[in-house]
Image (cartoon, helix red, strand yellow):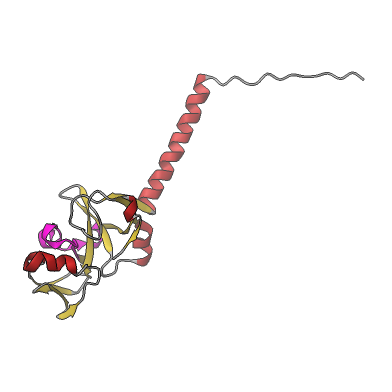
Amino acid sequence: MSETTSKTEPKQESFLDNVWDFLKTLVVSMIIVFGITNFIARPIQVVGTSMFPTLQPNSIGMANILGRKTEGLKRFDIAIIYVNEKKDYLVKRIVGLPGETVSYESGTLYINGEAVSEPFLDEAYPEGRGEAFMTDVEPLTLGEDEYYCLGDNRPASKDSRYYGPFKEAAIVAKGAFILYPFDQFGVKSW
């Protein structure tokens, strides 16, 4: 019996094989990123000071699309709202729910005529701003698919007082998981 050794040469990958592998990886990655950002979590960047002190300007994080669809929207949720006129997203807080009558008088939120506390507001911050922190809002009854949303830093926020109530379809995500700055890392709900 004679043993024969067979040596197989390693297959040389051609340039086209490398390009094809790269394109497959790129397409799969794009599908995964598309799926995550449209069905699970949306990247956000806080622009401006309208949500200060809850969210710092230029904070970067993710918002919960899946939770918005499965859990719905609740009073005081942080909402990511698409504003068609601006072709941009806003980060605000839901204060009024569909069918409710919302108003503010002397800095107090009223829902259907009853005072409601806003525990997410750091008491020292509004007090430091004086009476100008929140202007009065005449009673407004929301439609069955409308939400009244405000920034936590009321004097610096363009919100439902400016745009009017937001339709449910415009609210694309809720909550904020802040990734940067690192000292703010974590879920921000209050």
Give the residue at the far bottom of this rendering: 114
Image quadrant assignment for residue 54: bottom left
Q: Nearer the viewer, residue 65 or 76?
A: 76
Identify whether 100 is placed above or below 70.
below
Estimate the x, y position of residue 161 in percent, counting from the top left.
11, 62
Estimate the x, y position of residue 80 in percent, counting from the top left.
26, 56
Give the magenta range: 148-170
One can see residue 180 in this view: no
The residue at the point 20 percent across, 77 percent down is 116
The residue at the point 74 percent across, 19 percent down is 7
Estimate the x, y position of residue 136 in percent, counting from the top left.
7, 70
Q: Nearer the viewer, residue 180 or 140?
A: 180
Q: Is residue 1 magenta?
A: no
Left/right placement of residue 137 relative to residue 100 reads left
The residue at the point 12 percent across, 57 percent down is 156
Identify whether 32 is placed above or below 107.
above
Estimate the x, y position of residue 180 in percent, counting from the top left.
32, 49
Image quadrant assignment for residue 187: bottom left
Left/right placement of residue 119 relative to residue 7 reads left
One can see residue 93 in this view: yes
Q: Is residue 163 magenta?
A: yes
Left/right placement of residue 30 relative to residue 8 reads left
The C terminus - image quarter: bottom left
Identify whether 162 is placed above or below 110.
above
